[in-house]
Image: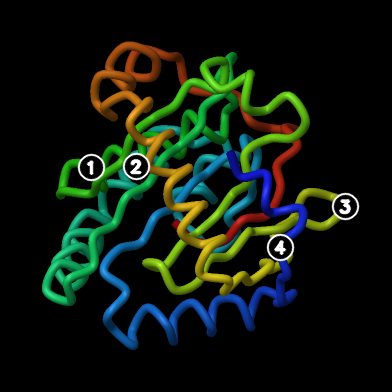
Amino acid sequence: MFDSFASGTAERLDRPAYHADLGRIYSGGGIGFLNKLERGQHFREHGFPSWEAFAADDWERALVLADERREEYAQELDKASRSGVRHRRLRVVEFPVTPYVQWELHVLRVRVDVGDDIRILDARAIADIERTRPVPEVVVLGDEVMYEVVYDAEGNADGARRYDDRSLVRETNAGFDALYERGEGFFAFFDREIADLAPPQVTGTPEGSRGSR
């Protein structure tokens, strides 16, 4: 599963080029769906108010600011629905849960509240798949194109590798589908593993740069 990434031909895009290319294809219509697989456990999201509060150890404000994005997320999903694009996200979570992931899942809870389709996969459940490397962090636009998000030596988001080989894209979507079926419903996981956790202590925690939620 996902083994073909090593042999696939990719175009390397820096962050601005990646975002521009993704936006162009997404807004061009006809893709049908967007699949997003998230694997990293440590990120920075400078410029995202809720993350800034979280990074400053102001947990209550981070949650308030996350909830303030509710209407924006609802509009985003409504626009996707009207465009005929189904969004699915699979979030892989390691244990113990990192401060970043604890915060992120509170943000994702707001998205799920307004209808986003997000499932959670315990990293321990895919140890057999990840014997040689973690599953890739990817964004797939229909059967047309996919991006493997890449990071620099310090763990900062550094653009993506763009793949447009249709057979590889279809293979990746099949792998995503298989993992998505193994994932757990968001609220079942959140209520059991996240809701009762104490606020995380993040000062001095190493986090890599990611981008906006």
- Which amino acid does the dot numbered 2 rest on? Leu
Query: CA gap, disc 3 to disc 2?
Result: 27 Å
Label 4 secondary element: loop
Q: Which residue is mark 2?
A: 108
The amino acid type found where label 4 is placed reads Gly
* Label 3 vs 2, first from the N-terminus: 2
Marks 2,4: beta carbons within 8 A? no
Residue at the image point whose x is 67% and y is 44% from the top? 3
Residue bearing the label numbered 3? 153
The residue that mark 4 highlights is 8
Q: Residue furthest right?
A: 153
Residue 213 appears at what percent x and percent y?
Answer: 44, 56
User: Which image quadrant is residue 108 in?
Assistant: top left
Q: CA distance from mark 2 to mark 1?
A: 6 Å
Q: Earlier in the sequence, mark 1 or mark 4?
A: 4
Residue 112 badge = 1
Mark 1 vs 3: CB contact within 8 A: no
